[in-house]
Amino acid sequence: MIDTQSATPIYMQLAHLLRLQIEAGEYAVGEKIASENQLAKQFRIGRPTVRQATELLVQQGILSRKRGAGTYVEAVSLPNVDLLSFGGTGIAIAQADPDAATCWLGTIEMARRADDDFYRLRRLSVILGKPALLEDLYLRASVFADLPMRVQEGDSISNAVMEEYGYTIAEIQQQFAILMANEQQAERLGIRQGMPLLSVDREIHLTEHRAAVQANIICRSDLFNFRQTIMVPRHHGKTTQ
Amino acid sequence: MIDTQSATPIYMQLAHLLRLQIEAGEYAVGEKIASENQLAKQFRIGRPTVRQATELLVQQGILSRKRGAGTYVEAVSLPNVDLLSFGGTGIAIAQADPDAATCWLGTIEMARRADDDFYRLRRLSVILGKPALLEDLYLRASVFADLPMRVQEGDSISNAVMEEYGYTIAEIQQQFAILMANEQQAERLGIRQGMPLLSVDREIHLTEHRAAVQANIICRSDLFNFRQTIMVPRHHGKTTQ
DNA sequence: GCCACAAAGTTGTCAATACAACTTTAAATA
DNA sequence: TATTTAAAGTTGTATTGACAACTTTGTGGC
């Protein structure tokens, strides 16, 4: 229910509630949810506040709205096991090559970043005997206490996030760019300096903490197919049968 | 200036105007822009409308806000195009620039591909006055009957898929690579030949037909931030409170 | 000159209200 | 029974207004 005395804004509470309902199966994918007016009456809040809540879920891909028709449940983008769909690089790499190896470049260090403390970890993954990707990870120190004691080389970071710390990943934001390999990157990836590489800047948002993990991943897209699968929400437009 | 008679919503016009000012250097990175109240007075619009405009830019990474302090220009940020999260390029492009234009390169032609007939359409999208992406689309002829009669230049292909033909998109598969611009691509995108570009090979699977749309998209990732947001399913890992 | 406190200014949240643009539903007519 | 049109319902945009929570600025006293 909506707790008007809570420190959490009403629109966030409603967004969370709606999301729980969807996840619990109370709304099926493709189904229309209650109208904005109905939700406003049901929770005794204003329609702009309802819109702010649903806007949150629209941006997250959970809902979609169509003027005049209604607000529909979208299919949440399911994680594919390939690299760019989900936080866990370990699983994707293991599926590509069971004998793949991920080795740390140096040890976990402290680093300061945007006025906060992070653990920094750099690692190189080798698939089918070839250097495939270079990762530079920053994990927020306040979120991942005692990280150096709790993860070891070879451990999956996403597994640690979930199993060791008990967090859940809510959202990943990725940005794609091309960079020219510098001397160090070139050496580590077995390429010539200046070669263009696919660079993915990734922010992993936990349910409990935003931007808890920030990573840059450099991919040898010339050697491997870096794919992703996106499940797309069902639309309300008529479907031929 | 804000044109209240325009079909473009006022908040989008203001967002666009602010971005132009920032890009023109009228606001430096790190600098505080005019307050919400000042902008409201200046443009004779409501403060919620100003907030909606700045919220747009906050989401795109161009602005950031701090309660009590003000609204600041973020570190130099290319306009975000949320191209790679969802099927529709048209929507993503329109959000980045309401005045964006997509023009066909030639007309729709028949093409044979993997033992089937396709309609082939090439088009160039211009965002903020700059060539942003080049698309080479193949639409399966048996799925999209009479396509040339049913879509026109400027039409959204994903809209046509859904509205005109009534299909629903079930899944998108994407593959990321880097290619060096050939002569024609270089000319169309306003770059030098051989420049590395982000290339996305995309297959759109309809509920009713697999691989109904196959596309290659070449992005000027040096001019725009091509981002995506992935929602992650809730895991059964326990959640700390 | 420094410190504390109040005033002013800023963003964040919330609401009522209105109209536009669209879709859906129901009723009336042929 | 089918089609057309009007009514109802839905989302999209916008405004005015208010208060909370925060930051910044200015003033007064020591």
Image (spheres, coloured by chain):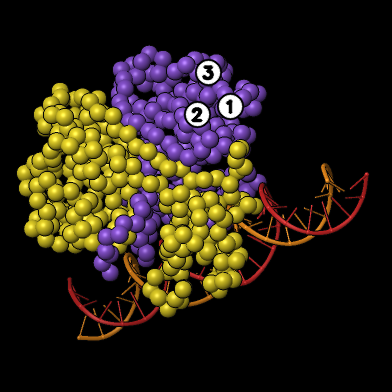
Chain colours: A yellow, B purple, C red, D orange
Whole-angstrom CA distance, mark 3 to mark 2, is 11 Å
Whether tag 3 and tag 1 are in contact, CB under 8 A, the answer is no
Where is A172 relative to B105, above or below? below
> Which mark is first along the chain, 1 or 2?
1
How many other residues sit within 10 Å of disc 1, few (<14), some (14-19) or many (≥20)?
Answer: some
Disc 1, SS: loop
Q: Nearer the viewer, residue B165 or D9?
A: B165
Residue under numbered circle 3 = B117
* Lower sequence index among marks 3 and 1: 3
Respond whether the residues carrying marks 2 and 1 are from the same subunit.
Answer: yes
Q: Quadrant of residue C13?
A: bottom left
Does residue B74 appear anywhere in the picture? no
Which amino acid, by three-letter code, is at mark 1?
Phe
Q: Residue at x 53, y 72 (%)?
A: A43
- In-image side of A202 versus B68 (left or right): left
Q: CA distance from mark 3 to mark 1?
A: 11 Å
Identify whether A110 is placed above or below B69.
above
Q: Amino acid at mark 3?
A: Asp
Q: Position of residue B97 (x, y in %)?
A: 49, 39
Residue A202 position within the rendered picture, expressed as x and y whole percent measured from the top left: 28, 45
Q: Give the crowd class for mark 3: few <14, some 14-19, many >=20 residues within 10 Å.
A: some
Chain for numbered disc 1 = B
Name the subunit of mark 2: B
Residue under numbered circle 1? B144
Asked if labels 1 and 2 touch by Cβ distance under 8 angstroms, the answer is: yes
Q: Residue at x 41, y 15 (%)?
A: B184
User: In the drawing, what numbered circle is on residue B212?
Assistant: 2
Q: Earlier in the sequence, mark 3 or mark 2?
A: 3
x, y (%) of residue A6? 40, 75
Comparing A168 with A67, the one in front is A168
